[in-house]
């Protein structure tokens, strides 16, 4: 299948998931994960109507996305971000999904102040509690969010999680449901500098379930390039 056909298929799957959940497909953004592809494939995605591109490493984003300058796309950092790469990252991307520590938030604020930029971020939550995954525990989120007002060059736009891989995508539903409920609880507290507009959850194997549970962004890689 061509990339254009894959994009059409994924969009149709999202539309059906939205129908089951009583949502509009307009509420869901496909973030194309381009970690394993090069500029020609990214160009094919743009030509097929994908406008959100997600990279996992700053060096790769620098190499690829700068070749697409002038193109109409939104750049996302979706992989683990090291503090020594923050300055370069802020000059490349529009949204960071993978903010997983207070020290990283402080560095983003520091570099944002230097660049005169307020950076939208999503806080990564390790809902499943897996030792191999980065992210805040649900229990520590509240104290972190209470301190966001101290960081004027950071705005929290929502939450992100990575569910464990299961052969049956239905088994990921509790993780996605837990993240949505956590976001609802946070939203009700009306903390300064904290918004819960975005839920980044779901990947190629389980994005339909994530959409049914409230995802506003799904990070799709292999399903677009198979």
Image: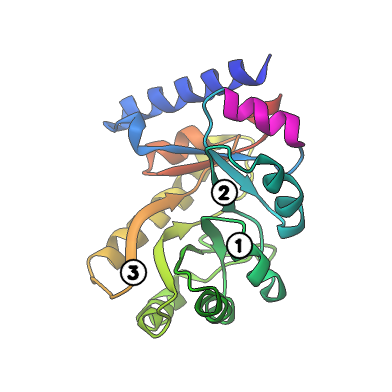
Instruction: Say which quarter of the image contains residue 77.
Output: bottom right
Coordinates of residue 53 in the picture (x, y in percent): 59, 42
Give the labeled residue for mark 2. Answer: 75
Q: Residue at x 39, y 52 (%)?
A: 198
Q: Which image quadrant: the N terminus? A: top right
Q: Is residue 15 above or below residue 58?
A: above
Q: Nearer the viewer, mark 2 or mark 1?
A: 1
Question: Residue under circle 1?
Answer: 91
Classify 10 Å Cα crowding around label 1: few (below 14), some (14-19), many (20 and above).
few
The verdict on residue 46 being magenta is: yes
Camera-side residue: 134 or 172?
134
Residue 130 seen in the figure: no
Give residue 59's position: percent from left, percent from top: 76, 57
Q: Which residue is mark 3?
A: 194
190 sits left or right of 68 in the view: left
Q: Position of residue 194 (x, y in %)?
A: 34, 69
Q: Label 3 vs label 2: CA separation?
A: 21 Å
The answer for how far apart the CA atoms under marks 2 and 1 are is 10 Å
Is residue 100 shown to the viewer in this render? Answer: yes
Q: Quadrant of residue 168?
A: top right
């Amino acid at each position: 299948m061509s990339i254009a056909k894959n994009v059409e298929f994924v969009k149709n799957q999202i539309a059906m998931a939205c129908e089951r959940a009583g949502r509009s497909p307009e509420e869901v953004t496909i973030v194309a994960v381009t970690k394993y592809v090069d500029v020609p494939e990214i160009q094919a995605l743009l030509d097929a109507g994908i406008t959100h591109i997600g990279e996992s490493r700053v060096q790769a984003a620098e190499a690829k996305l700068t070749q697409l300058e002038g193109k109409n796309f939104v750049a996302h950092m979706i992989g683990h971000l090291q503090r020594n790469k923050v300055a370069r990252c802020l000059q490349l991307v529009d949204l960071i999904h993978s903010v997983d520590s207070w020290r990283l938030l402080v560095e983003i604020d520091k570099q944002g102040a230097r660049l005169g930029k307020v950076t939208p971020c999503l806080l990564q939550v390790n809902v499943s509690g897996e030792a191999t995954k980065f992210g805040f525990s649900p229990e520590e989120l509240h104290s972190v969010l209470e301190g966001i007002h101290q960081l004027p060059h950071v705005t929290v736009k929502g939450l992100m999680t990575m569910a464990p891989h299961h052969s049956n995508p239905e088994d990921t539903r509790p993780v996605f449901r837990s993240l949505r409920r956590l976001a609802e609880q946070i939203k009700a507290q009306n903390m300064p500098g904290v918004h819960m507009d975005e839920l980044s959850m779901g990947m190629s194997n389980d994005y339909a379930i994530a959409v049914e549970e409230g995802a506003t962004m799904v990070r799709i890689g292999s399903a677009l390039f198979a």
